[in-house]
Image: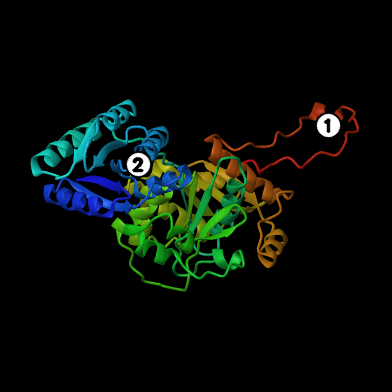
Amino acid sequence: MLRGVIICPDHELSASLQEALEKTRRVGILRQLEGYPGELDLVRFLRASAPEVVFLGMENSRQAITVAQCIESHVPGLQIVAVGRSVQREVLLETMRAGIREFLTVPFEGDAVEQMAARVADIVERKPPAIESTERVLAFLPSKPGVGCSTIALNASIMLSQLPDTKTLLADFDLNCGMIAFMLQMDATHSVVAAVENAHHMDETLWPKLVGSSGNLDVLPAGKLAPGHRIDGIQIGHLIEFARRHYQAICLDLSGILEKYSVELLHESKEIYLVCTPEVPSLHLAREKLHFLRGLELDSRVKVLVNRAQRNSLIPTSEVQKVLGVPVYMSFPNDYLGVHRALTSGKHVSPNSELGAGFAALASAIRNGQQPQRPSRPGLLDLLRPRKKQAPVAHEPSVLAS
């Protein structure tokens, strides 16, 4: 069934059209607008609804043509059907010049509506509308509680949100002990559960009422503890698809318990960041989770992050890689004081610290789709050469070499 919307100031005409479309069982009307929206509102409306066909009332042909041109500009391939009480030669010529090839007039006879729906469906099947949607969905999965997964998810999300053209959402799906709202000192009036429960009729007016914000970052907090809460997979799909059309990056903070809805989110994710620490219990559970993800054929998406790594650790990175059987993507140093300061201030870890620089490097790697930048270590000859005095410069991002 085609997904359709109606933009028509004539309420009676709109109701008559919807009744005729329902009879065909070929088109489902998602939403209706009783006026011609401006460009910004129209783009938001289309992203929220993701229709395949727009039925556009021609009461004011000039405004209608402007809307049609805007649709073609922002969503190429989205089919437009002009609708009116009658057809005038001048209006018909205008619609044709605007690229509109379908025109329905009252009375909406069954055969005419059926044939129109069949033609539109054929075009959509061959060339679906190109609604902008991101693939950058990132899941942060802890090997066990307490490894600092939420700290990494939060700080990487904040760093992502500060990059150009990277509108970012952080959703806390740890319903057992979600910490994101607490870490940001955010009053969470709504929760990710409320967003999921309203996902099937989410729109551009409801969404801002459900998400909070911290600087440039949009946040869906976990809300009150809800262990054992069931979330339907279809609801997950609706919510993620809505978010894909509104954000350039979507970060998911998971509990690590691998609830059924968490598995659905892992399938939706392009990259899965498995967070562990260089300790035997954490590495044991990280290996078990890798085995589980391999069974789901998701292991190719996994990137291992080692938190609280030390240069003289009892279990060095080389041993971590041997235990897990996969390379370590990035390591982050232990900075208890820096994390404590961030928690007490409700902010992110200072980017001027080694840990903060690591988060910035991770965000940059995610945004650019490249390997994270690692610092180059000076050789012996570099150490023996005389050093020139230089003016102070901003701290360069760095991470521990894996």
Relative to residue 33, is residue 388 depicted above or below?
above
- Looking at the rendered structure, the kind of residue marked 2 is Asn
Disc number for residue 146 = none
Whether tag 2 and tag 1 are in contact, CB under 8 A, the answer is no
Expressed as whole percent of the image width and height from the top left, the position of residue 330 reads 58, 44
Specify few, some or many for label 2: CA neighbours under 10 Å numbering under 14, 14-19, or 20 or more: few
Looking at the image, which is closer to me, 86 or 72? Answer: 86
Disc number for residue 60 = 2
x 45%, y 70%: residue: 176
Specify few, some or many for label 1: CA neighbours under 10 Å numbering under 14, 14-19, or 20 or more: few
Expressed as whole percent of the image width and height from the top left, the position of residue 223 reads 48, 70
Expressed as whole percent of the image width and height from the top left, the position of residue 319 reads 55, 46
Regarding mark 1 in the picture, which secondary structure is present there?
A: helix
- Looking at the rendered structure, the kind of residue marked 1 is Leu
Expressed as whole percent of the image width and height from the top left, the position of residue 258 reads 38, 60
Residue 81 lies left or right of residue 325; in this view the side is left
Quadrant assignment, res 386: top right
Please tell me whether mark 2 or mark 1 is closer to you in this view.
2
Residue 308 lies left or right of residue 207; in this view the side is right
Disc number for residue 383 = 1
Residue 359 lies left or right of residue 239; in this view the side is right
- Residue 60 shows in the view: yes
x 69%, y 65%: residue: 345
